[in-house]
C-alpha cells in the first residue's frame, strides 16, 4: 500500500456479525487488536442482523457499526425508538454509525435527524464501474471529501444530537435534551449555516420572529450575530454568555467542536431566564 501512497488509516476492515459466530472470541479479539495496532479501523457489518449484537459491542472493540436499513423497511411503531437508542448508545461508547441500504430521501432525512451522518445505498447510487462514477457524481451533485474535510465532519458526527447536552454537562439526559434548544452550526466566514437543530431549537428560533401591534422584528439574525462573535473567540472550552434580545433574555453556551482552514463548527444551547 505504501508504494501506492495509501495509508493504513484510509483502509477499513469489515467483519460481519455472522463471522463472529463462527470464530472463537479470542481469535477475533486478537485480529482486531492487530489491525488497530497497524492503524486500520475495524467496522462491524450487518449490525442487528445477528443474535448477539449487544454481546458483540461488549466483547469487541469496533470503530463503527454498519446498520442494515432492511430493519427500517420492516418497521413498526417501535422501530424509530430502537434506532435512536442504537445511535445514542453507539455514540456514548465512542463508536461511529453508518446506515447501509438507504433507498429514499425520507430514510436519509430520518437518519440525519437522529445523528447517523454516514449512509450508503441506492438513494445515492447503485454500485458502478469506475468509468461511470464521474457522470453519476455530476448527475447527483455529489463531491468527494478531502482528507481535511473528512476529519472535520467526522468530529461533527461524533456529537450526540440525541443527547446534545452531554458536551456541556457530562451527563446523558435524553428527556432534558429534548426540551432544551440545541443546535450545531457551521461557520464558513459568512452567515452561520445550521447543520442540526432539535425540535426545541426549531421552535425557539421561530419564536424569535416577534410580532406586535404595527411591527415585526426578526431577532434570529441578531442572535446568530452574537453566536458568531462568541464563536470567533472559542478554542474548545465551553463559553457561557448572558444575552438579551428585545423581550428575550437567556444564557448561551457554546463549544467549538471542529475546525479546518476556513470553517468552524459549534454546538450551542440556550436557557431562557
Image (tube, grey):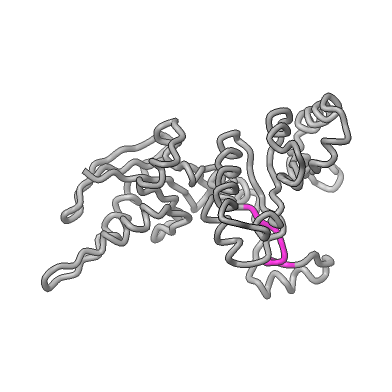
- Image side of residue 104 versus residue 224, left or right: right
Name the quadrant containing residue 47: top right
| Spot occupied by residue 60 in the image (x, y as percentages of width and height) | 73, 30
- Residue 231 in view here: no
Residue under the point 63% across and 42% down: 96
| Spot occupied by residue 247 in the image (x, y as percentages of width and height) | 16, 54
Relative to 164, is 72 above or below?
below
The quadrant of the image that shows the C terminus is: top left
- Residue 86 in view here: yes
Residue 231 belongs to the span the image colors magenta:
no
- Image side of residue 129 versus residue 52, left or right: right
* Magenta segment boundaries in residue numbering: 118-125
Residue under the point 61% across and 62% down: 107
Name the quadrant containing residue 240: top left
- Image side of residue 165 versus residue 205, left or right: right
- Image side of residue 236 versus residue 4, left or right: left
The quadrant of the image that shows the N terminus is: top right
Relative to 16, is 194 above or below?
below
Residue under the point 11% across and 70% down: 213
Q: Main secondary structure of the magenta part?
A: loop
Residue at the far front in the pictured view: 77
- The total number of labels drawn is 0
Amino acid at each position: 500500500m505504501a508504494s501506492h501512497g495509501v495509508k493504513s488509516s484510509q483502509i477499513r476492515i469489515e467483519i460481519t456479525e455472522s463471522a463472529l459466530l463462527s470464530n472463537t472470541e479470542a481469535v477475533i479479539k486478537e485480529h482486531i487488536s492487530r489491525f488497530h495496532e497497524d492503524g486500520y479501523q475495524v467496522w462491524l457489518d450487518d449490525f442487528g442482523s445477528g443474535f448477539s449484537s449487544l454481546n458483540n459491542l461488549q466483547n469487541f472493540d469496533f470503530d463503527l457499526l454498519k446498520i442494515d436499513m432492511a430493519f427500517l423497511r420492516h418497521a413498526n411503531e417501535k422501530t424509530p425508538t430502537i434506532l435512536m437508542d442504537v445511535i445514542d448508545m453507539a455514540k456514548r461508547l465512542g463508536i461511529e454509525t453508518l446506515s447501509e441500504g438507504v433507498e429514499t430521501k425520507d430514510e436519509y432525512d430520518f437518519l440525519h435527524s437522529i445523528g447517523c451522518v454516514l449512509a450508503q445505498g441506492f438513494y445515492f447510487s447503485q454500485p458502478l464501474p469506475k468509468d461511470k462514477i464521474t457522470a453519476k457524481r455530476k448527475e447527483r451533485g455529489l463531491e468527494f471529501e478531502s482528507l481535511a474535510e473528512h476529519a472535520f465532519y467526522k468530529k461533527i458526527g461524533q456529537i450526540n444530537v440525541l443527547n446534545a447536552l452531554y458536551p456541556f454537562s457530562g451527563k446523558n439526559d435524553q428527556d432534558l435534551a429534548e426540551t432544551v434548544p440545541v443546535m450545531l452550526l457551521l461557520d464558513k466566514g459568512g452567515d452561520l449555516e445550521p447543520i442540526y437543530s432539535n425540535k426545541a431549537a426549531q421552535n425557539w428560533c421561530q419564536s424569535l420572529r416577534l410580532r406586535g401591534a404595527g411591527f415585526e422584528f426578526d431577532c434570529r439574525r441578531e442572535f446568530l450575530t452574537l453566536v458568531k462573535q462568541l464563536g470567533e473567540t472559542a478554542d474548545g472550552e465551553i463559553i457561557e454568555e448572558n444575552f438579551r434580545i428585545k423581550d428575550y433574555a437567556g444564557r448561551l453556551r457554546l463549544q467549538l467542536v471542529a475546525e479546518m482552514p476556513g470553517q468552524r463548527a459549534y454546538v450551542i444551547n440556550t436557557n431562557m431566564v
